[in-house]
Image: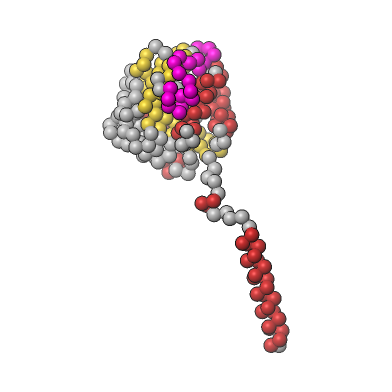
């Protein structure tokens, strides 16, 4: 009996050692050694422009999760590396200030939503709105979002809509309307930069002109600006 016990004990020790050796040879799966997957919450609608936008986000390596403007919350946003708000949302008021203090980068392609977030004033068609055209002016060619472009740039093949804001606070203006330098078509707040009432941005904020109904007319340079804006927002540029 005693001898049988000793044999069983020895077998158990040998099995334990073998398992330990296998474990030590396996690749580590700790959180620190596993790259965080790029993920974006997309808030918009089901237009062709929304589809094109989501396709470009996927091409940039993002896993896209769709939510409505009513579903998105500050708590939900924290689980992602980017939030994209399109102007095709049902109501700017449904977004409101939900993401004001969210420490996740946000891209606003809806000018009206920026008025809730102290990036511009509250007067429609004055502080924010839409203009038509095919070109924009690059105002800061050295900014990473400009992607080496400068001066007047065709971003639509045909007349299309541009969302605009007159930014407040310490926003950096990358591009403006072709005929009005006060109307920003691409404007950004880096993390810590103050908005219109002096509050610091908790993470990067981007305003982008793209109107989903006209994205089918977007030129290669237009998509280049879009891609660069997304990459800058998440710190890849």
Magenta stretch: give its range.
141-159
119 vs 32: above or below: above
Residue 207 location (% of width, % of height): 41, 27
Question: Overall secondary structure of the magenta stretch?
Answer: loop
* Position of residue 46 measured from the top left corner of the image (x, y, whole percent): 55, 27
**Extreme-left residue of the structure:** 197
Q: Using the image, determine if residue 20 lies above or below residue 129.
A: below
Can residue 142 be found in the magenta stretch? yes
Q: Is residue 230 visible?
A: yes
Q: Nearer the viewer, residue 122 or 153?
A: 153
Q: Position of residue 117 (x, y in %)?
A: 35, 31
Q: Residue at x 34, y 21 (%)?
A: 166
Q: Nearer the viewer, residue 190 or 48?
A: 190
Q: Residue at x 52, y 28 (%)?
A: 227
Q: Residue at x 43, y 43 (%)?
A: 75
In the displayed structure, would residue 83 be above or below residue 207?
A: below
Residue 37 is situated, as x and y percent measured from the top left of the image, at 54, 43
Q: Quadrant of the N terminus?
A: bottom right
Instruction: Name, please, the residue furthest toward the bottom.
Output: 1
Closest to the observer: 201 or 21?
21
**Residue 88 visible, this angle:** no
């Amino acid at each position: 009996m005693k001898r049988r016990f000793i044999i069983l004990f020895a077998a158990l020790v040998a099995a334990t050692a073998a398992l330990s050796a296998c474990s030590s040879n396996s690749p580590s799966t700790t959180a620190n050694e596993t790259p965080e997957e790029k993920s974006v919450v997309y808030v918009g609608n089901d237009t062709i422009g929304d589809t094109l936008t989501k396709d470009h986000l996927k091409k940039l390596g993002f896993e896209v999760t769709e939510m409505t403007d009513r579903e998105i919350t500050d708590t939900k946003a924290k689980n992602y590396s980017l939030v994209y708000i399109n102007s095709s949302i049902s109501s700017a008021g449904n977004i409101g200030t939900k993401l004001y203090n969210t420490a996740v980068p946000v891209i606003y392609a809806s000018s009206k939503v920026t008025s809730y977030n102290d990036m511009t004033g509250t007067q429609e068609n004055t502080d924010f709105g839409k203009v038509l055209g095919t070109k924009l002016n690059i105002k800061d060619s050295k900014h990473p979002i400009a992607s080496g472009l400068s001066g007047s740039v065709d971003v639509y093949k045909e007349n299309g809509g541009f969302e605009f804001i007159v930014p407040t606070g310490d926003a950096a203006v990358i591009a403006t309307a072709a005929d009005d330098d006060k109307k920003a078509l691409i404007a950004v707040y880096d993390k810590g930069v103050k908005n219109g009432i002096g509050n610091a941005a908790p993470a990067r904020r981007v305003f982008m002109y793209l109107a989903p109904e006209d994205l089918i007319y977007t030129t290669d340079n237009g998509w280049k600006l879009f891609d660069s804006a997304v990459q800058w927002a998440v710190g890849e540029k």
